[in-house]
Amino acid sequence: MKVQVIRIKNLQVAFDDERPLRTLAAKRLQLPPQAVAEVVIVRKAVDARRYHGAPVQFVYMLDVSVNMPEKKVLQKLRKDKNVEILVQKKAAPLNFRAHTNHDLRPVVVGFGPAGMFAALTLAKAGWNPLVLERGGDVDSRKAAIECFWQTGTLDERSNVQFGEGGAGTFSDGKLTTRISDGHIQDVLEAFIAAGAPEEIRYLHKPHIGTDLLQGVVKNIRKEIIRLGGEVRFNAQVTDMEIEQDQVQAVIVNAEERIACQQVFMGIGHSARDTYRMLLAKGLKMEAKPFAIGVRIEHPQEFIDRAQYGEDAGHPRLPVADYALTYKDPVTGRGAYSFCMCPGGQVVAATSLKEQVCTNGMSNYKRDSGIANSALLVQVGPEDFGQEVLAGMNLQDKLEKLAFDLGGRNYHAPVQTVGDFLGGTFGSTQFLTTPTYQPGVKAVDLHKCLPDFLTRTLEGALPHFDHKIKGFADKGAVMTGVEARSSAPCRICRSRETMLAEGINGLYPMGEGAGYAGGIMSAAVDGMKAAYMFLTER
């Protein structure tokens, strides 16, 4: 008998229910267990709302293969909107143009998510891309980062922002995204093929963690090379040749000329020198809104209790996260939590000497015992000016102030919530020991953040405390500054072709170009840029 597939949506199961999914699926479909051949998890989320004292629930979407006609199964459940026959549609094959001996190989600038997936897509299509990454390979990059965190000796070329895998490699490795795109599954499958956990296929909030992600990006690089591509590290594109609105060549490390006709520009949101170079070449760019703020830390156990109640700490439950928003009733300016890292640490993330900026990071197991998140406030051209690089200049200014305030040794300025809200500073009665390395200094964060931003945070913290009681504990430590949540400007491109406006052969992509906001959306943007070129006629 042909095996039929039925999709069950919104199947709620108590988190501590250890019965096999096959048993639960059979019960939901009112079938004997032997009628169920296979169960595949399509989506798994956590519902911690605990209605009327009920335990935390796992909410599943399942594809269930049954050994009987699906119409017979659905006869009893025909009015159930959460049970349906799975209709699988095959994607139409893409007709790529072939590489010829007369074609120059495409150049991919940057080996973050956008560059990585643009290069992988081009390599699979037989176009033998050349990847130029200003930072080091992931192993030498890791050594440089650890040296900086331990000694305060910064490598401006290879750091948390630059190097194999991009900024996301030294973060939480979150794979959540707000975009809806068919290529998302392609990206997830590529990660799994490179060694990521298979659970990222179905978890509602998948993540890899920086420890596993380092191996994953290395394996994707090896696959690109196996397919005929080339990846060069410590190779910064310092200039471009453009003639008659057509890319002709890139200049590497101010000395080597590489002729090319297609450049896939995935520079990342911290490539300030590259932004200046592109603006000087005449590329159309514009200032865009972004966000600035601080990192806040709490015991992970506190966040778990706030979300899971008495179920907190159970081994079947993941460490908890949170998402908080606030809108100032007077100014209308928004504040929000961002890049929340359960069981992680706050990291020194600067790529420039004599500047301090922060980010959050966690490993796959998220077992540090400390929760941290950015608390960000929206800023826009109305705050810093309409000039293209005005937002970038504001980032520069604030990160230099943070460096000065921290003691000019890459220690970060910190302040307790109690001091911040009370108009005092200097307290070191921290709720948790600050995780930022090389070190911290207790100061007044008002001295390195704009007034409009601190006023918004002063309104947001009590609001967040109302949502999560104890969030604004007077000993909770805030570390400054976080100013690189997204790009401060956008490289304008055609919506139809993804080419830079007025420049043939140049594909701005990913976070650095202003068209993505995380690992997944940047990876998808890189894939789409490559597909745009490969299907161009």
Image (cartoon, grey):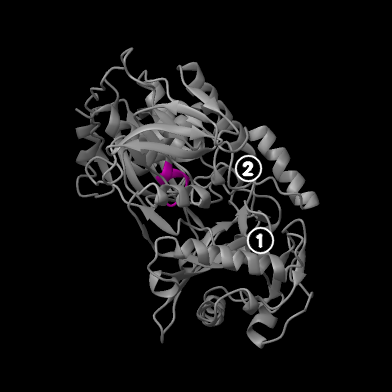
Q: Is residue 491 above or below residue 117?
A: below
Q: Residue at 74%, 66% (x, y): give it.
A: 432
What x and y, as percent, mark residue 190?
45, 30
Amino acid bearing label 1: Val
State whether residue 40 appears in this view: no
Amino acid bearing label 2: Arg
Q: Which mark is residue 157?
A: 2
Q: Which mark is residue 100?
A: none
Q: State if disc 2 and disc 1 touch (CB < 8 Å).
A: no
Q: Is residue 300 above or below residue 40?
A: below
What x and y, as percent, mark residue 255?
55, 32
Neighbour tally class for label 1: few under 14, some 14-19, many 20 plus, Cα within 10 Å: many
Q: Give the quadrant of residue 287.
A: bottom left
Q: Is residue 518 magenta?
A: yes
Q: Nearer the viewer, mark 1 or mark 2?
A: 2
Give the structural element (helix, strand or loop) at label 1: loop
State whether residue 135 appears in this view: yes
Closest to the observer: 365 or 390? 390
Q: Is residue 111 above or below residue 392?
A: above
What x and y, as percent, mark residue 158?
64, 41
Closest to the observer: 441 or 175? 441
| Residue segment shown in magenta | 517-522
Whichever of labels 1 and 2 marks the residue nearer the N terminus, that label is: 2
Left-right relation of 351 to 45: right
Closest to the observer: 4 or 376? 376
Give the structural element (helix, strand or loop) at label 2: loop
Q: Which mark is residue 356?
A: 1
Quadrant including the N terminus: top left
The secondary structure that most of the magenta stretch takes on is: helix
Q: Give the quadrant of residue 357.
A: bottom right
